[in-house]
Image (cartoon, rainbow, N blue to C red):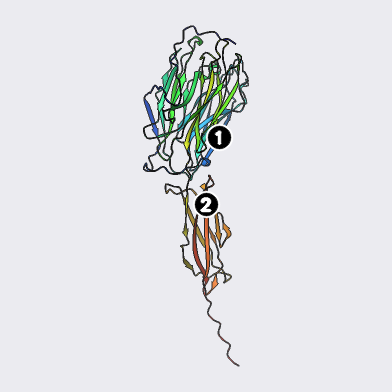
C-alpha cells in the first residue's frame, strides 16, 4: 500500500550505525545522580541470575494517558526497564489509532515509568481492556552498590520533515545500563507513527560498548499537528558494573509491500547479561510503524522487540533493528558471620531437664561484597547443629543438649543463600553443660 508523500520534501540526516563508528549529536546533559556511597575501585561481583524483573500492570480503562510505574523490592537496585502490551495491535495494514508509548524511562533511581496514550474516542473503544506492562529490572539485595544516575537531554522541539537524532551520553567513567525517552502525544497520529519515534537505542562507541542513548524522530508536517518535544535518557552506573559488547540484530522486510507484525531478539554473550535494549525502524520514514513490545528476554539474557512495519511498493529496503545493552557478569560473593554465641564459648546454663541448657540466642548477619549489612529477608537461612537442621531465620533461641558436669561439644553452622543461588557459611564450636547438683546427704545409720 502506498502512502501520500508529505507536502514538503524531507531532507534527512540519516544515521548509519555499526560497531565501528557512530555519528552523534550531543546535547546538554542534565544529571540526576544517586548517592556516591562507596569509593570507586575494583569492580565487585554481580551475577546475571541476581537480576529480577518486577512488572507492574495497568489495564486501559480510560481515554488519554495511562501512567505505569514499576519498582524494585526492598534492598534491590533498579538498573533498567522495558514495556509491553498484553496483546498486539488490532490493525496491521496500516496500523491506526493504536495504543502508543509516549514514554519509557527511569523516572528516578527507584522507578521505571511507562506512559501509554489511548487515542480511542470513547472509554469502551477498541483499546479498552488492554494491559500496559512496565518492567523494572532489579539487582538483588545481595549485590554491591552500583550508584545509579540519570543523564537526560534538554527537552527539544523536533523540527518537521527532518531526521533528528537526540543523544545523551553517560557521565565520564560510568557505565550505561539502559535508556529511554519521553515525548508528548499528538492525538491519534501517534497511534499510526509510533509517537513519531524512529529509534530508541543505545549509542555505541568504536569498541562496541554502549556509552549513551539516542532517540531518532522525523515528524511529518502534512499531519497538521505541532511538532513533538522529545527528551532522551541514559541510565548509568557509577561503580561495580562493567560494559560488555552491545549487539544488534536486523529483521529483514524483503517482502511484498504491506504491513505486518514483525519481531526479533538478540542475545548477549554467555558471559554477559542485559538490563536494557531498544529498536530502530530503518528505511522509508513515511511508513507507519508501531513498537508494542520492548523488553528483556527471560533471565535477562538478551532483548526482544515486537512491532508493526512495512514498506511501500517502490522501496523494499526497510527493516527493523533490535539492540541489546550487555554487561559483564563476574561471579558474586556474600559473607555471613555468627554474632552469638561466641566461638569456643562455654555455656554453663542449668536447664530443665538437667541434660539440656536453657534457651540460647543464636544470631548471625549477612553482608554483600562491599561489606554492607544485608536485610535478613534478602537471603535464605539454614542453621545446623552437629549436622541436623535446627533454625531457618537470622536470629532465634534454642536449647542444646548438655553434659552433666562435663561439657558437651556442639558444632553449629549457618548457611545463607542469596537470590543468585550463591551461598556463604560460618561455623562455631560451643560447649554446653549443666551445673552439677550437690550430692544428696547420705542417710544416717539407724
Q: Is residue 297 visible?
A: yes
Name which residue lies at 47% across and 16% down: 218
Name which residue lies at 53% across and 60% down: 397
Q: Nearer the viewer, residue 263 or 289?
A: 263
Left/right placement of residue 73 relative to residue 167 reads right
CA gap between label 1 and label 2 equals: 27 Å
Task: Work out whether mark 1 precedes mark 2 in sequence or the reverse, and give the earlier one.
Answer: 1
Task: Give the percent coordinates (x, y) of residue 31.
Answer: 38, 31
Label 1 CA crowd tier, 10 Å (few <14, some 14–19, many 20+):
some
Q: Nearer the viewer, mark 1 or mark 2?
A: 2
- Secondary element type, mark 1: strand
Left/right placement of residue 3 relative to residue 16 reads right
Left/right placement of residue 240 relative to residue 51 reads left
Q: Is residue 32 above or below residue 363?
A: above
- Secondary element type, mark 2: strand
Task: Give the percent coordinates (x, y) of residue 33.
Answer: 39, 34
Q: Is residue 126 above or below residue 404?
A: above
Q: Residue furthest bottom?
A: 446
Please give the label number shown on residue 416: 2
Please give the label number shown on residue 55: 1
Name which residue lies at 52% across and 79% down: 438
Task: Give the percent coordinates (x, y) of residue 341.
Answer: 48, 62
Task: Give the percent coordinates (x, y) of residue 85.
Answer: 58, 27
- Tell me the quarter of the image containing the C terminus: bottom right
Q: Is residue 3 above or below residue 30?
A: above
Amino acid at each position: 500500500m502506498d502512502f501520500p508523500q508529505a507536502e514538503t520534501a524531507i531532507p534527512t540526516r540519516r544515521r548509519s550505525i555499526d560497531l565501528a563508528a557512530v555519528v552523534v549529536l550531543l546535547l546538554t546533559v542534565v544529571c540526576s545522580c544517586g548517592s556516591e556511597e562507596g569509593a570507586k575501585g575494583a569492580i565487585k561481583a554481580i551475577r546475571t541470575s541476581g537480576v529480577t524483573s518486577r512488572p507492574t500492570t495497568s489495564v486501559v480503562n480510560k481515554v488519554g494517558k495511562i501512567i505505569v510505574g514499576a519498582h524494585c523490592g526492598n534492598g534491590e537496585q533498579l538498573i533498567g526497564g522495558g514495556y509491553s502490551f498484553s496483546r498486539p495491535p488490532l490493525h496491521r495494514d496500516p496500523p491506526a489509532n493504536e495504543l502508543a508509548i509516549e514514554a519509557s524511562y527511569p523516572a528516578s533511581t527507584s522507578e521505571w515509568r511507562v506512559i501509554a496514550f489511548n487515542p480511542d474516542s470513547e472509554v469502551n473503544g477498541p483499546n479498552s481492556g488492554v494491559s500496559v506492562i512496565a518492567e523494572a529490572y532489579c539487582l538483588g539485595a545481595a549485590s554491591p552498590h552500583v550508584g545509579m544516575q540519570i543523564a537526560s537531554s534538554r527537552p527539544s522541539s523536533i523540527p518537521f520533515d527532518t531526521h533528528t537524532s537526540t543523544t545523551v551520553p553517560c557521565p565520564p567513567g560510568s557505565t550505561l545500563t539502559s535508556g529511554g525517552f519521553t515525548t508528548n502525544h499528538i492525538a491519534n497520529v501517534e497511534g499510526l507513527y509510533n509517537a513519531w519515534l524512529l529509534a530508541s537505542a543505545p549509542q555505541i562507541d568504536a569498541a562496541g560498548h554502549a556509552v549513551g542513548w539516542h532517540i531518532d524522530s522525523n515528524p511529518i508536517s502534512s499531519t497538521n499537528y505541532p511538532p513533538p518535544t522529545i527528551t532522551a535518557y541514559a541510565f548509568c552506573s557509577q561503580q561495580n558494573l562493567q560494559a560488555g559488547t552491545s549487539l544488534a540484530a536486523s529483521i529483514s522486510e524483503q517482502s511484498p509491500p504491506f504491513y505486518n507484525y514483525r519481531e526479533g531478539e538478540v542475545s548477549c554473550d554467555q558471559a554477559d547479561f542485559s538490563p536494557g535494549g531498544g529498536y530502530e525502524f530503518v528505511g522509508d520514514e513515511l511508513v507507519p510503524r508501531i513498537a508494542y513490545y520492548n523488553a528483556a528476554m527471560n533471565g535477562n539474557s538478551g532483548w526482544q522487540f515486537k512491532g508493526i512495519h512495512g514498506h511501500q511498493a517502490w522501496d523494499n529496503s526497510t527493516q527493523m533493528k533490535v539492540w541489546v545493552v550487555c554487561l559483564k557478569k563476574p561471579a558474586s560473593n556474600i559473607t555471613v558471620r555468627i554474632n552469638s554465641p561466641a566461638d569456643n564459648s562455654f555455656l554453663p546454663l542449668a536447664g530443665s531437664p538437667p541434660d539440656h541448657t536453657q534457651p540460647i540466642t543464636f544470631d548471625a548477619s549477612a553482608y554483600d561484597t562491599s561489606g554492607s549489612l544485608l536485610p535478613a529477608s534478602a537471603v535464605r537461612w539454614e542453621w545446623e547443629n552437629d549436622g541436623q537442621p535446627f533454625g531457618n531465620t537470622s536470629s532465634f533461641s534454642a536449647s542444646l543438649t548438655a553434659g552433666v558436669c562435663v561439657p558437651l561439644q556442639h558444632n553449629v553452622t549457618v548457611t545463607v543463600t542469596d537470590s543468585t543461588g550463591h551461598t556463604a557459611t560460618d561455623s562455631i564450636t560451643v560447649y554446653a553443660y549443666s551445673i552439677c547438683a550437690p550430692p544428696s546427704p547420705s542417710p544416717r545409720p539407724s
